[in-house]
Each structure stands twice: as C-alpha cells, then as structure tokens.
Image (spheres, helix red, strand yellow):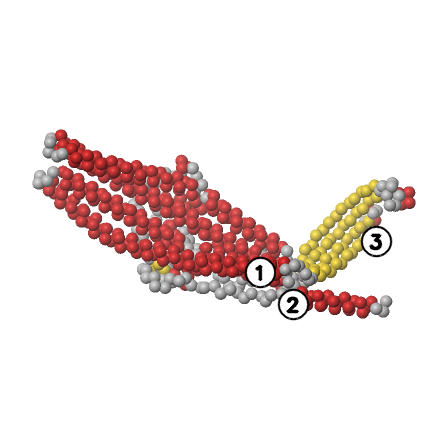
Amino acid sequence: MKHAPLRGRTLLAAALVLMLGACAHAPARLDQPALRDDVPLAGLQAPARTGWPTTQWWRQYQDPQLDELMDRAMRQSPNLALAQSRVNNAGQSARLAAAQLGLSVNGSAQVTRQRLSDHGLIPDQFLGFSWYNQADIGAQLNYDFDWWGKKRATMEAALDQAHAAEAERSAAALALQYAVADTYFGWQADRARLHLADQLLATEEQFQQIADLRVRQGVDLPDEAQKARAQLADVREMRVALDGSAKIRRVSLASLLGLSPDQLPDLQPHALPGVDGSLPADVRLDLIARRPDIAASRWQVEAALRKTDAARAEFFPDFSISALAGLSSIDLGKLLTAGSRTFVLTPALHLPIFNGGALEANYGASKAQLAAAVAQYNSTILSAAREVATQALSAQQIAARRHEQQAQLDADRQLLANAQARARQGVRDGRESLAAQAQLLEQRDAATQLQAQAVSTDLSLIKALGGGYQAPHHTDTNSTSTVTAGAADHERH
C-alpha cells in the first residue's frame, strides 16, 4: 500500500510526458491572411454620381409596372427561395456547432421486466425467483474542456459559413432583380421598335404602290417594283423578329417570377427611361463592402481560417468529464429510497500519439482550402473591377454614340421636312418624301436600340456596383451572433 502514491505519481508523470510529446509536433497557428482592401480601378475616368445605388434601386426609373414585377419576384421566385433555403441550412449548422460547446445534461428513466432462464449461469432455484424488475432513473452530465479551441473554432467556422450564405442570398437577389429589370426594359424596347416597324411598313407599302403604278404606266422598269417589294419584305421580316423577341421576353419574365406566361400582369408599353452611366466618387475604396459576392468570398476566407484552427487543435490532448447520478433498484417499491442511489464520475483524457499522418494530412487539407478561399477572394475582386470598368466605359461609349446619332436624326428630320415641302409645291413626287420618312424611321429605330443599350448598360453598372447591398461591419472574426453568444460566453469562462 505504501507504493500506491508512487505509482500514482508515475502515471501522472507518464501522462504529462505523453501530452508534451503530442503537443511538440503541433504546427504554429496561422495569421490572418493579407486581403486587399481596395479595388484596382486606377486610371478609370468616369462622371461621378451622387451616392451609391439604393436597396430598391429600380424605383429610380419611376415605373409602377417594374415596381410590381420586382415585388412579385422577391416574394415568389424559385431561385430566391433556393438561396434562402441555403441560408436557413447554414444557420441551423451554426446552431448545431454552438450546441456542442459547454455542458450537456441528459435525463433518462426506464423500467425492465425480465424472466431468467432455467438453464442459465445461475438457475432460478438458487435465486428464489424467475422474474425480476429493474428500474433506473438518472441524469448524465458531460463537459468537454475545449482548452485548445477546437469546438469553438468549428462553431465560428459554421457561423462564418452562415454569413457567407446570407451574402450569397443577397447576390442571388441582385441577380434576379437585374434579370427582371433587363428583361422588362428589353420588352419595352421591342415594343417601341415594333411601333416604328409598323410605321415603316406602312411607308414601304405606299412606296411599293407608287412603284407598281409607275411600272404599269411604263415610266420605270420592272426592277424598280422588285426593289420596292424586297424592301417591304425586309421590313416585314424585321417586324416578325421583333414580335417574336417581345413574346420570348414575356415568357422569360414570367419564368423569373415563377409564373406561367398567361399569369403575367398585362404590361403597357411606354418610353424607355433616361440614364447617366456615372460612378460613385469613392467606388475604388467602397466597392468591397458594396458587392455581395465579395462579402461572401470574405466570409469563406474567415471560415477556412477557423477550420485551420480546428485542425491544429486536433494535435493537442482533449480532456472531458462525465458524471451520472440516479436511482437503481430491482424492487420497484424501494426505487425512491436512499439505498437505491448510484453515482459515477468518469474523467477522460484523449492523447493523439500515433495516427499514421492523419492529423498532418487533415491540417494540410485545411491550409489548402484556406489558400483556395484567398485565391477566390482575389479573383472576385479582380472580376468586380473588370465589371465596373467595362460597364462604365460602355456607358461612356454609348453616350458618345447617342450624341453623334442625335445629330444625324436631326438632319434626317430636316430632310423629311424639305421633301414634304417640295411635294406640296408639286416640284417632286411623293417618292422623295416617302424615302426621307423611311430613312428617318430607320434612324429613330437605331436611336431606340442605342437607348435600350444605354438602359441595359446602366442596369449592368448598378449590378456591378452591388445594387444597394451593404456588407455588415466586419471587425472581429471571433464575434458571435445571438444564436451562439450564450455558448461562447460559457466556453470563455
């Protein structure tokens, strides 16, 4: 008996040696990776707009029809519902990870009635009974001392994944809003061009009638009538294409809203809105916080970093303790007496001594995932810069083209007025004024196409600027939400 304390100290020393040996090969904790805090837009010259797009940026176009379509899309789009399901799933995963922290208490109660075998190890004639009851009531407590932060890092990684899912949902909402607006204004452009095509078709029909009359009278050769028919057929083909495009856009719009085409509200055509194509003055510095895809990439980096912390903690020993207190009796009448008390206390120590390189491989995989997340973040930053620069330059180019095209449109209007004046004076026949009118209608169609391109580019620029998204203030990656705050505080204490 005198050697019992010595043996206890020996076991304790051996355990300490094993713990120190297990910790000796643990890798150093990784620092926060260096992430750029601005977007490479140096040298981009663009007009400055006042402020960033608002959350409901489409209302700036003052189109009640578009507002209604957006409201429906945000309520019932299948794509948005799918993104929201990912957010909910990530949130529950964060709650599950938080539930693993700290103390857990479980209660149990059971009653068993069993008959003993007559041919068992102890026959019933020696026991004096063949049937017996077993009743147990107890509570079990388990606590894992997360000294190295493995469970906390896992919880924080799940929380960062939830933040990333929320940002990805915002990106999905922005993509949906952009698609609805772009499709709607594309339909408006098709309807405007259809109206011009109908006027051009009427003009070409008049031109063909005059050409046929002049051929019948022997004034012109039959080739002139054939040319008029060819021009008329070309206009008819264009009208068919525009009508088909408008119908396809309606089907696409209904699909974006999760509706069938006949459920889509009746849309009325009207003029396309005006746009400016300018950029916020602080776009280079603030774009990172304004793009949901960049925010999602940033949270993925944070989640990957926390996973490396969890993988590193695997190198260290784990210590946990469990306790069981309850009542147990084979006599139901004596279950609630003091003699039925039972108690178990189980401390446990887990030492990673030899695992065939599994810990190193797991840690290396987590580092590779972190490197991939950082690379994805940098790629997202460059893609954002490219999108903003491309759309801003496209807007400037379209604005310059519209300025030059307006001069041509004014000249064609003057030519039509002069031709009509000569026709009224009887100096020239109606063909000159019809040709001038057809040329003017073609220029108006070209102007409508440029205006549609300007609106589409403005929508793309709003999307490139984040569409009113504002990332939550990112201060400390160890911060927790209300879902995990209680468990985290308990773990800190």
Residue 1's label in the rendered image is none
Quarter of the figure that contains the N terminus: bottom right
Label 3 to label 1, Cα distance in Å? 55 Å
Residue, x 86% and y 43% (percent of image)?
A: 120
Label 3 to label 2, Cα distance in Å? 49 Å
Quarter of the figure that contains the C terminus: bottom right
| Residue found at the far top of this picture | 216
Corner quadrant of residue 42:
bottom left
Residue 354 position, x and y percent, is 68, 61
Q: Are marks 2 and 1 in contact (CB under 8 Å)?
A: no
| Residue found at the far right of this picture | 126
Is any atom of residue 74 visible in this view? yes
Q: Is residue 398 left or right of residue 250?
A: left
Kindly identify the amino acid type of the residue bearing the numbered disc 3.
Gly
Residue 24's label in the rendered image is 2
Q: Is residue 62 left or right of residue 443?
A: right
Residue, x 45% and y 64% (percent of image)?
A: 36
Residue 136 position, x and y percent, is 78, 49
Kindly identify the amino acid type of the residue bearing the numbered disc 1.
Gly
Lower position in the chain sequence, tag 3 or tag 1: 3
Corner quadrant of residue 116:
top right
Kindly identify the amino acid type of the residue bearing the numbered disc 2.
Ala
The image shows residue 156, relative to residue 5, as above or below, that is above
Residue, x 65% and y 67% (percent of image)?
A: 24
Q: Secondary structure at mark 2?
A: helix
Residue 339's label in the rendered image is 3
Lower position in the chain sequence, tag 3 or tag 2: 2
Lower position in the chain sequence, tag 2 or tag 1: 2
Q: Are marks 3 and 2 in contact (CB under 8 Å)?
A: no
Label 1 sits on residue: 364
